Image: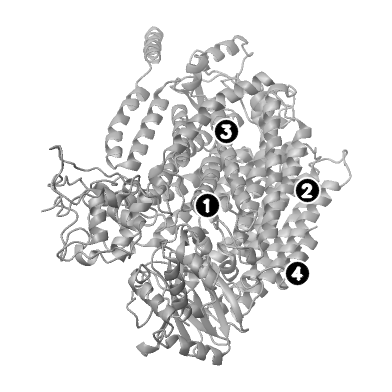
Amino acid sequence: MKHSRAAVLLACCTSACSGFDRQSAVDPAGPQAESIEHLFVFMVVIAVVVYIAVIGATIAIIRRRKATDEDPRSPSREASAARAIKLAIGVVVPVLFVLLVYDFSVGRSVNAMTNTPMLTVELTGHRWWWEVQYEDPIPQNRVRTANEMHIPVGRPVNVKLASHDVIHSFWVPNLAGKKDLIPGHVNEVIIQADKPGVYRAQCAEFCGAQHANMSMMVVAESPERFSKWIASQRQVPAPPVDTLAARGQTVFEGGQCAMCHAVASTRAAASIGPDLTHVASRLTIAAGTLKNTTANLGGWIVDPQGIKPGVDMPSNALSPTDLRALLAYLRTLQ
Amino acid sequence: MTTADKRGAITLPPAIDQGDRERLQKTWEPRTGFIGWITSVNHKTVGKRYIATALIFFLFGGLEAGMIRLQLSRPDNGILGPDLYNQIFTMHGTTMMFLFAVPIMTAIGIYLVPLMIGARNIAFPRLNALGFWVYLIGGGFLYVMFFMNTGPDAGWTAYTPLSGPEYGFGKRVDIWAQMVTFTEISALIAALEIITTIFKMRAPGMTFSRLPLLVWAQLVTAFMVMFAMSSVATGSIMLAADRLIATHFFNPAEGGDVLLWQHLFWFFGHPEVYIIFIPALGMVSQIVTTFTGRPVFGYPVVVTALIATAVIGFALWVHHMFATSVHQLGESFFTAASTMISIPTGAQIFCWLATIWLGRPVWKTPLLFVIGFIVVFVMGGLTGVMLASVPFDLQAQDTYFVVAHLHYVLIGGAIFPLLGAFYYWFPKVTGRMMSERLGKWNFWLLFVGVNVTFFPMHILGLRGMTRRIYTYSDAMGWGTLNLIASVGAVIIVASMAVFAFNLFWSLRKGEAAGANPWNADTLEWATTSPPPPYNFVDTPVVIGRDGLWDYGDEFPVITGLHTDRPEVLITSVMTAEPRYRHEAPSPTFAPLVMGVLIGAMLIAGVFTPWGLVYGTAFIGIPFYMWAWPDKREHERNLREENEKRLEKKEAA
Amino acid sequence: MIAGLAKVSCMLLPGATLVCVLAACGGSESRDFRENPPAGSPLSAIKESELEPGGAVHTESTTVATLNNAYAISQGKALFEGMNCVGCHFHGGGGIGPPLMDDEWIYGSDPSQIFNTIVEGRPNGMPSFKGKLNNQQVWELVAYVRLLSGLGGTSVASAREDHMYLSPDLQLRKPQKPKNAAAPFK
């Protein structure tokens, strides 16, 4: 019974069976996740062996013949019981030691900092979205975005973790273990992807009403594509040419949007909510909750409480023309 | 032959006086009816009250779990919104941990320990009654506020700053913090009494090496409670102060630290699970002994394992905090300790298996639950050792993998033994046997249900499902496994329904049990079922570790305790020799009054700090009621002293 | 058996009733994420003139659901900082703008008057937030502003915020009875 469960477990996990396997600890795409997965498999094997031994012994003991004549306190049987127990403990303790040694070595390798200068990203957790800032010695080259992080494949990325309000936790299971974002502390975690792909990260520390919907996408791409992405993120959006989009910009700057959001080189410069300078280039909106389509964006803008009840974004009663204009404008923010 | 002592000479047993029974009955149960019940200081009455209340909280916690599973059975389910869901899972954890698990283990100790050590009552009987009222009021307060939409919603762990003043707005977490105060007062009271009872009131001849294993477990647990509860009390008071009077314990901007809460909480929180687990281990030992017909193999190993688990249990707490970025040396230490704690528990399990192999097992329901415990708990223990390793823990922490682990160890390690204990001791408490057929249904439904519900959660956690989420999207692919888990929850509900039905039905129609239907060895089986208010007509004398099995035809007792006043026998700590007779306190309203006033003080303290100030003044009143000398007792003592003085004068 | 069931349900009925009654309370903890406008349209209830027929003076009149709601006050506090009210009013002590934690209300302390102040703006520097905040957000701010002088909501307010301690414990604010409740305009 237990055998087949383990087989199903591993089979289910190592193949992209049903659904989204881009948020899975047993589908590693980076060196840390991989060494952790190896450790996990090792531990599962030991656990299965120990479990089978214990359950097997239990079943054997239950099913032994009904011995009514044997003295329950017979010294010879007690002596063999003592021997069996000593043997069992004598086997278990060294196995635990081996496990401990392997575990310490994996821990140290996962924590090891490399010497090559690495990309540094500052991740700040908010209720309930992720603020992402790419560090750079040149101020103009710093990129500010939200709910999406691009990283080059094969290079370690140092993610500095800070929190704006409560404790959050950054967890991208395909790449690395989680680390908490704690107000008053600055933590760091190094992640590295060895395969290109889109990996989903989710907040893993209960942070309030919309903890369930606080995710982000970690996009691992080749270094060339990453440079192109960063370059496009550094660009400031041009004023829209289309009249509808221009009207949309007026709606954005003059209405509720600018009170919380920022778009570079416009009059909207607030930092309460996510930066929207390149919102159209993102895969998802609302912190990984919705695919980034016009329909979703429209629904989100008009009634965020219907999708994520409890977020700080208020409902926006826009006339249909204003909404169309706003959406057209936001689509230009690539 | 014992020496006389200035408090009263103890004689060797003459023929037992049958009139003793009636006199003892009148002395130990002076008032009947409702007044008698509510003023009772008898440990069995208070113990049964605790158990009944804890079972009601278990029902509530189970209903909350049912709602959680219902909401999570499908993706994007709309049964519970985020706010209500957050309250419900918080209440589930809080109820199960604070209001059910610890109190019921304590309650079983309060009921059984005096019986198992041959004492007439527990130490500090009035304090015992107070402990129950404080627990009832605290739990009731929490639930009344929950029904008023003010239930806590920051998780049973209430991490700051989510539970702090800014993000935990409103009164919700204040209610939680105060409930913690209530239950920790109650737990500390019970622990204090259990330690004192076990140290000072054992039957003559019951040295520590002859103590039944459940009594050892309760002793070790009581010590753990004393150390662990202090930590959570400190933390919850700091949290309440932060929220009410703007202190800055957890405010990093003003010199506090957010992580301080986690350390204080988990220093309690980890021993807490052992506080729940170790009494269950004691129950397993007793069940295995009785149902195999031989004492547990390796008594010293089992006792050492209990103590080792308790001590090491205090050195594990940071394993709940590995994701907060712990210094590497700390990580290594806590990993090693968390791995090591499996060894004593494993040793105990090997000893029990050896006992079953050596003995003649009788496959009644209690022993079935012990086997279920082994199968379910060992799985949880193995995932626990996996979680001890930091790199893997950083993947599995705060996911459903941990939910699976904790339910396997808590249900396997505490609920299975607890149910076995119910089937085992129900005849003693009520005088009736529970139905074996229903017991087997209960066991198998629970066994299947637990595995169907919680095994898929291991997989869910590794596939990315984090904890404490009120919904998830269909695209994640978690729907099937969640549905399976929810179906398993239905099976567990069925099992608990069978248990409840068995309980109530057996109370009315169960087969009558005699004093010792299982032919067990511990002292509680040497008196009637249910035991009389005075427990034993004459205090038994213990001659070996195997209790009643050592006696053969003769049953040595010690007489000399007065029958016209409630008296208990105090013995020495190490050698269990009788030292003196102690007059036990009589029933009174004082603990109820004091419990109500403490309740009023703490409840008012949630809303205004002045509540604590004024409340303290009022508590002085029941103090006087409590400690006021009993008039009849005082006059009787004076009379006896005069008589003795006259005797001395005449002899001189 | 039937008698037993009847007995049990008779015992449960008062308990169930109690639960229903209790569940009806708890409005102060409800999280109304969607806007729940108060009865009557607030804008039309705002007085623009000092003159009143009948001689009697019209004082505090508007009751709004947000005034005693923990979530609303918490959101109001976040908005007070997020919308930079602190830039002029500081944390109630005033600076460029008048203090909000005292008993002097230039433009009136009634919730509808505070609503008007925020939405329409006022001479001498108070900007108009019309179109910048929706009604629910403004009512949340109204509740918080009244809390600053202790006029309501102290029982559900948080004692402090999780940053530097800048103003006294909100739960212990003594109500500052508005000096000129009868005269809305100076």
> Which residue carries the number 4 mark?
A11
* Residue type marked 1: Gly
Q: Are marks 4 and 3 on the same chain?
A: no
Q: Are marks 2 and 4 in contact (CB under 8 Å)?
A: no
Q: Are marks 2 and 3 on the same chain?
A: no
Residue nearest the viewer, comparing B2 with B337: B337
Tell me which chain the residue with mark 1 is part of.
B
Q: Are marks 2 and 3 in contact (CB under 8 Å)?
A: no
Q: Which mark is residue B51?
A: 3
> Which residue carries the number 2 mark?
A78
* Residue type marked 4: Ala
x 17%, y 61%: residue: C94
Residue nearest the viewer, comparing B103 with C11: C11
Q: CA distance from mark 2 to mark 3?
A: 38 Å
* Vertical order, B288 against B569 (above or below): below
User: In which image quadrant can residue C60 be found?
Assistant: top left
> Which residue carries the number 1 mark?
B81
Location of residue A97 in the rendering, given as x and y in whole percent from the top left corner = 64, 68
x 69%, y 45%: residue: B490
Around disc 1, counting alpha carbons within 10 Å, would you say few (fewer than 14), some (14 to 19), or many (20 or more)? some
Q: CA distance from mark 2 to mark 4?
A: 44 Å
Location of residue C4 in the rendering, given as x and y in whole percent from the top left corner = 65, 21
